[in-house]
Amino acid sequence: MNELEIAPLLRGLSFDGEKGAIVVFRETLGEAELVCAPEELAAKFAPGIRSVKVEGVGGFLLGEDYDDAVGGTDEAPRATGRAAVVRNKVCVVTGGAQGFGEGIVRELVANGALVFVADLNAEGARRLADELNEKTGRTVAFGVAANVSDEDSVKAMIDEIVRTAGGIDLFVSNAGVLKAGSVKEMSLRDFRFVTDVNYVGFFLCTKHVAPVMEKMNAPTGRYFTDIVSIASKSALEGSNKNGAYAGSKFGAVGLTQSFAKELTADHTKVNVVCPGNFFDGPLWSDPERGLFVQYLNAGKVPGAETVADVKAFYEAQVPMGRGCYPVDVTRAILYAVEQKYETGQAIPVTGGQVMLN
Ligand SMILES: NC(=O)c1ccc[n+]([C@@H]2O[C@H](COP(=O)([O-])OP(=O)(O)OC[C@H]3O[C@@H](n4cnc5c(N)ncnc54)[C@H](O)[C@@H]3O)[C@@H](O)[C@H]2O)c1
């Protein structure tokens, strides 16, 4: 056994009814409350033990949150109700450096989670984590480099997280890209690019996170973990001249249902959130490259003279009259985590724009 197997096992063994301890790996450790061989760990570990030395592997520090594990201070904000469901849980948000992902990261941190911001833009991910740690005065986030469409990169990301925190309770597969275009004109290269990030990326992340969750949940059989994919309203209804994107998002629903059926045996739930448009995010509102400017310049909205006109046109298509915000998406994620009797579901968050049959 190596540290990548032992850390999730310790997180599972320290399960408190909601979650396990944060487990921080150290190659060397001085004194430890428990010293044992790998195969003795399950029998000798008792909840409350805060340091473990496993012969031939290394040391592990345990605590309620990250700072408690490494320094003995637990100052995570107390939370009640649905917000408490992620308190001191280890969460990962891919594509977390900007847009919906960034907003979900901020919401999860506000609810007391330890969040790994995983992004192709490693610099942006670290900047966001640094900002959140500084603002809260605690270690609440880490930035980690990841390309979800590259298997080696995904594996390296998961390993780094397991060494740093012991496991993963909630994996939010949010990284996604969009290239619109007519089926008659779109290049195979563009089609594959969208498919690789949105569809293959969700497969690769699930492939590498599911075994970690299995190890965490095995000791008690009562530990629930969650994988939540962020698809789109275009996962529920086709999108004109946007087939690569909608197809990849429909595909994510199919993967979700299939993974959910398999992983329920490990106590891992898999659900997918299908948001409406985040009009205030960079995809739509970037002043130079955003869709509002592009649609204005392309004359896509008849009579529109300003970006505000284009925005108003799109908002009017939503029964609730506004775009979707990260807080709306996070509420659906928290529901999926809190709910222990549902898996494989597509949860729309569209202000009524798309309704399930
Ligand atoms: N913006 C919307 O209106 C909207 C609506 C419905 C669903 N969504 C979905 O929400 C998710 C986030 O969308 P957004 O608009 O916030 O996107 P965005 O373009 O603002 O941000 C995407 C983030 O993902 C990162 N990323 C891109 N490719 C990656 C890769 N291969 N590996 C790791 N990180 C990568 C980018 O660096 C960026 O930080 C996507 O899955 C998108 O399809 C967006």
Image: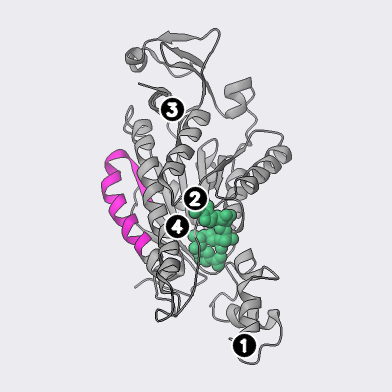
Mark-to-mark CA distance, 2 and 1: 39 Å
**Mark 1 is on which residue type?**
Gly
Q: Quadrant of residue 263?
A: top left
| Image vertical order of residue 74 relative to residue 310, above or below | above
Q: Which residue is mark 3?
A: 11
Question: Which residue is nearer to you in this view: 39 or 62?
Answer: 39
Indicate the quadrant containing the N terminus: top left, top right, bottom left or bottom right: top left
Secondary structure mostly seen in magenta is helix
| N-terminal label among 2 and 4 | 4
For the residue labelled by badge 1, is the local secondary structure a helix, a strand or a loop? loop
Q: Which residues are magenta?
A: 251-270
Give the CA distance from mark 2 to mark 3: 21 Å
Is residue 253 magenta-colored? yes
Mark 4 CB lies closer than 8 A to ligand 1: yes
> What residue type is disc 3 on?
Arg
Mark toward the start of the polypeptide (2 vs 3): 3
- 4 vs 3, front mark: 4
> Would you say residue 330 is visible in this rendering?
no
Please tell me the numbered disc located at residue 334: 2
Count numbered badges in the picture: 4
Find the distance from the CA under tag 3 to the CA under tag 1: 55 Å
Question: Residue lying furthest bottom in this view?
Answer: 303
Q: Secondary structure at mark 4?
A: helix
Residue beneath disc 4:
197
